[in-house]
Image (spheres, helix red, strand yellow):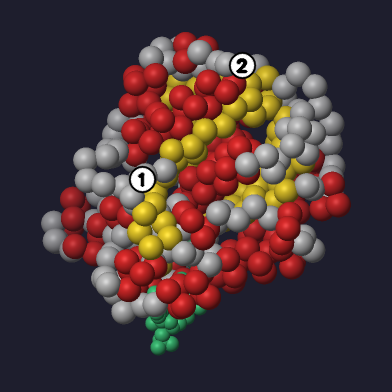
Amino acid sequence: MTERHHGVKPFARIAGTGKAVPETVLTNADLEKIVDTSDEWITTRTGIKERRIVQRGEKTSDYCIKAARIALDEAGVKPEDLDFIIIGTISPDMRFPATAIFVQEALRATNAVAFDVSATCSGFLYTLNLGESMIALGRAKTGLCIGAEFLTPITDWADRGTCVLFGDGAGAAVLTKAEDDRGILSTYIGSGGDASHLLYCVGHGTAGFINTGKEDPSERVIHMKGNELFRFAVRAMEKSGLEALKLAGLTMADVDWVIPHQANMRIIKALGERLECPMEKIIVTIHKYGNNSSASIPLALDDARREGLIKPGQNVLAVAFGGGFTWGGSVFRF
Ligand code: ACO
């Protein structure tokens, strides 16, 4: 699914970003005490050194609200001016209402429509596609796109193949109408279900206990066949990047920064090679946050902006893939 801009005038722009990550840091040394692993294995296989983990009693919406307030402040947008709040998450507060509804209520964003999308690690790019489409069609002027995950509460802490990977957090972006040539130049999203068995969590879905009546504790946690996903991930992100560039009428030579979904440092490096993009142009946060699914791109975007890496007028290419499968790419200019 695509939004085409003929390489010219954007409809929407990112007017502010924000992030919220838990204070608690779980290092690789901490994990050595939980499962049979080592800092050396985790670092060389994934690039992760530490991750942020939530505490009991916290909710996904708490972090969305924090990130949203920072993004709204930067954009100078009042909550009542929001036309939409869209959250990409696979770890919502509840089965329903949508996590976005809790955020709407906390912000008093009374004029917004608020809903979640479930698109695993591509979640934030899906929200960008939807939000931008609403603005392009004239159905909205301003809105919030959020990627947020609490993966550690649905992690199997006895499975060393997955528990070393995940982290928690939320990132937000305020979208508003573009005024000049700065803004979202393309969004591209896709999905395919032929390998959904490689990464899933039954949770409280109808495929599980509530319909079968059979207790199975493994339903609560994420299941992943990591090395089969690996190959797909590189191909999907390369394709997404090239599609997003084509739609924006740009090439890699025009790109100042690439923000890939932060799943694994080896995937990021392989992607860089395929896109012929030097590592200096790739934003990497995996060492400090781990893989926090749909939150990873908006977190990296916010960090890169606040560190002064992304400058006005620069082109950013974001690419993601995730369980399902899902994938996506977007080019935006600040
Ligand atoms: N510490 C030590 N050894 C480990 C660990 C660990 N934490 N985890 C696995 N191993 C062992 C395995 O048991 C295996 O041992 P064996 O050879 O004796 O059987 C060996 O290491 C190799 O295991 P692999 O799974 O083949 O390791 P691989 O190099 O593929 O790395 C990893 C695993 C890091 C998970 C990698 O495959 C990966 O990152 N894949 C992509 C994950 C991903 O992108 N997921 C999608 C996004 S997440 C989302 O959507 C929510």
The numbered mark at residue 23 is 1
The numbered mark at residue 141 is 2
> In the rendering, at what x and y percent does residue 24 appear?
33, 50
Q: Is residue 17 left or right of residue 87?
A: right
The numbered mark at residue 281 is none
| Badge 2 amino acid | Lys
| Badge 1 amino acid | Glu
Q: Is residue 260 left or right of residue 111?
A: right
Q: Is residue 243 above or below residue 67?
A: below
Q: Quadrant of the N terminus?
A: top right
Q: Is residue 207 above or below residue 98?
A: below
Task: Identify the residue at horizontal 14%, vertical 61% (top origin).
Answer: 215
> In the rendering, at what x and y percent does residue 150 appear?
35, 47
Q: Is residue 34 above or below residue 71?
A: below
User: Could you tell me how far apart the alpha carbons at marks 1 and 2 are, in whole angstroms?
Assistant: 34 Å
Of circles 1 and 2, which is in front? 1
